[in-house]
């Protein structure tokens, strides 16, 4: 993880994740959801799992709701 810039009470953070695997049928909706929510004041929370020094992005959440659950509802 690297900090990009900091100004007053805000900062940008560069995470070491390049991929988030998801069912390809959900991928277009996932891109749209992410674009809609990336800049909200609430913020998206990342669930990260670490084993033997290797980190994996397991899920995202917004308002306490899982990204995967939100997508399944939107695709119905």
Image: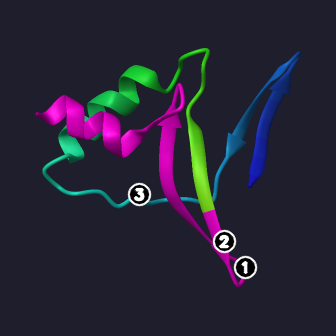
Give the quadrant of residue 76: top left
- Tell me the number on the disc at residue 50: 2
Q: Identify the image quadrant of residue 21.
A: bottom left
Label 2: which secondary element? strand
Q: How much space separates mark 2 and mark 3, taking CA atoms? A: 15 Å
Q: How crowded is mark 1: few (under 14 residues within 10 Å), some or many (20 or more)?
A: few
Q: Residue furthest right?
A: 8
The residue under label 3 is 20
Q: In the rendered image, which quarter contains the N terminus? A: bottom right
Q: Do the residues labelled 2 and 1 touch (CB within 8 Å)?
A: yes
Segment tinted magenta in the rendering: 49-76
Seen from the viewer's position, the closer of residues 9 and 45 is 45
Nearer the observer, 43 or 19? 43
x 53%, y 59%: residue: 57
In whole angstroms, how far apart are the C-alphas of marks 2 and 1? 6 Å
Disc ID at residue 18: none
Please name the residue shown 19% across and 40% down the image.
Answer: 28
Answer above or below: position of 65 versus 52.
above
What residue would you read off at disc 1? Answer: 53
The answer to whether 50 is drawn above or below residue 64 in the figure is: below
* Image: 36 above or below 64: above
Secondary element at tag 1: loop
Q: Position of residue 45 (x, y in %)?
A: 59, 38
Q: Is mark 3 on a helix, strand or loop?
A: loop
As drawn, 37 above or below 56: above
Residue 29 painted magenta: no
Residue at 58 percent of width and 46 percent of height: 46
Q: x and y percent of residue 72 in the render? A: 22, 40
In this orientation, which residue lies closer to the viewer: 13 or 46? Answer: 46
């Amino acid at each position: 993880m690297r900090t990009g810039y900091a100004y007053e009470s805000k900062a940008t953070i560069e995470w070491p994740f390049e991929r988030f695997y998801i069912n390809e049928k959900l991928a277009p909706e996932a891109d749209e959801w992410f674009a809609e929510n990336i800049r909200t004041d609430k913020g998206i929370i990342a669930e990260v799992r670490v084993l033997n020094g290797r980190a994996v992005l397991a899920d995202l959440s917004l308002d306490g709701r899982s990204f995967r659950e939100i997508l399944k509802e939107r695709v119905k």
